[in-house]
Amino acid sequence: MLKWALIFAVIALIAGALGFGGVAGAAAGIAKILFFLFLIGFVVFLVLGFMAGKKITGD
């Protein structure tokens, strides 16, 4: 998901440089949404990993 966010961010930068404001805004919005979804998923899996590690080690 982070890969797609970066792809859309690059598309937004290129479209903005070429003067396609609507396309650049849409691509930037999609990139922002995908990045925050990635960030939420990362934090959830990080917390689940720490909880599983505590159960395995018995701390």
Image (cartoon, rainbow, N blue to C red):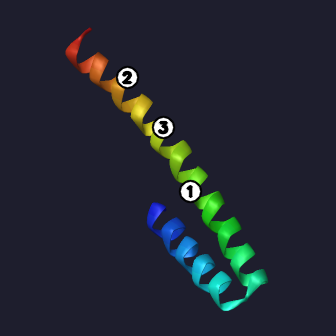
Please tell me how many numbered marks the rendered image carries: 3
Q: Determine crowd level at label 3: few under 14, some 14-19, many 20+ residues with C-alpha closer than 10 A.
A: few
Q: Residue tagged by mark 1? A: 35
**Which label number is shown at residue 25?**
none
Q: CA distance from mark 3 to mark 1?
A: 12 Å
Q: Residue at x 72, y 89 (%)?
A: 19
From this viewpoint, which residue is outermost toward the left? 57
Amino acid tagged 3 = Val
Q: Which quadrant of the view contains residue 34?
A: bottom right
Q: Going by the image, does 1 lie left or right of 29?
A: left
Where is residue 33 shown, x and y percent of the image?
Answer: 65, 58
Q: Residue tagged by mark 3? A: 43
Amino acid tagged 1 = Phe
Which secondary structure, mark 3?
helix
Which quarter of the rendering shows the C terminus?
A: top left
Where is residue 20 shown, x and y percent of the image?
Answer: 73, 88
From this viewpoint, which residue is outermost toward the top? 59
Q: Nearer the viewer, residue 42 or 23?
A: 23
Name the front one of labels 1 and 2.
1
Q: Residue tagged by mark 2? A: 51
Amino acid tagged 2 = Met
Which of disc 1 and disc 3 is earlier in sequence?
A: 1
Which of disc 2 and disc 3 is earlier in sequence?
A: 3
Q: Residue at x 52, y 46 (%)?
A: 39
Q: Nearer the viewer, residue 4 or 28?
A: 28
